Amino acid sequence: LEILHNYQEDRTVLQIFQHKSHTSNKLRFKLAQLMTEAPKFQKQHLFEEATRVPFIFSVPWIKEPHGKATHQITELVDLYPAIAELAGLTPPPGLQGESLVPLLKNPDTKDWKKSFSFTICRSGGESIRTHEWRYTQWGYGAKGQELFDLKYDPGEFTNPANDSKYDEQRKKLKEQLETKRKDAGYKHNLYNMKKN
């Protein structure tokens, strides 16, 4: 937390502690939802800098990988199953997330199979992000779509969604997004509020 504070990035931090003894079996979890240089935060935008959430875990009984990062894709829905497992609880069936414990034990594990993340925002957008691509659509595609090659355009400045050269990639990502939306139980207009 001190490092986050030094960079003035500690505005939203969640700490969860479980104590079985004074020091030896303490579970310490810190989630920092960092603000970015651009004014895109609070998960109302679907650009990379707004949707990323750094996880900082410290689990004393998992000693080997302390201080190591992973480049695997994770989602906020993976948080609850991980905390439940670390606390020795059995999560209820039907959760969308997967426990992050395999990544805590080995950040480079090949057992982690999540290949994309899914994010929605209140303004009618939904986005899917893989290791190399982000595809976003607005109004189920009727109000626009965005496609970003994160390898060559990590700042997401060039949108080739309407370039026929990217049709195959765009269609593949759109299909993955729609499947994930259905699996997540997301329903069109469920959260839209009527204005008087």
Image (cartoon, grey):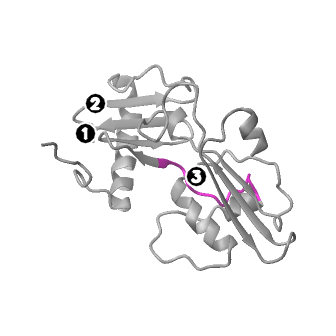
Is 38 located above or below residue 34 in the figure? above
Residue 95 location, x and y as percent? 47, 69
Q: What's the amino acid at mark 1?
A: Gly
Whole-angstrom CA distance, mark 1 to mark 3, is 25 Å
Magenta part of the chain: 106-117
Whole-angstrom CA distance, mark 1 to mark 2, is 7 Å
Is 107 located above or below residue 20 in the figure? above
Give the image quarter of residue 167. Answer: top left
The numbered mark, 1 or 3, whose residue comes first in the sequence reads 3
Magenta span has 32?
no
The residue identified by callout 3 is: 74
Residue 187 location, x and y as percent? 26, 56
Whole-angstrom CA distance, mark 3 to mark 2, is 26 Å
Q: Is residue 67 left or right of residue 78?
A: right
Q: Which mark is residue 144?
A: 2
Considering the image in quadrants, where does the C terminus appear? top left
Q: Residues within 10 Å of mark 2 (few under 14, many from 20)?
A: few
Magenta span has 110?
yes
The residue identified by callout 1 is: 139
Total numbered labels placed on residues in the image: 3
The numbered mark, 1 or 2, whose residue comes first in the sequence reads 1
Q: Residue furthest left?
A: 196
Numbered disc 1: secondary structure: helix
Q: What's the amino acid at mark 3?
A: Thr
Q: What's the amino acid at mark 2?
A: Gly
Numbered disc 3: secondary structure: loop
Judge by depth and name the residue closer to the eye, 146 or 86.
86
Q: Residues within 10 Å of mark 3 (few under 14, many from 20)?
A: many
Residues at discs 1 and 2 in contact (Cβ within 8 Å): yes
Numbered disc 2: secondary structure: loop
Residue 32 location, x and y as percent? 63, 46
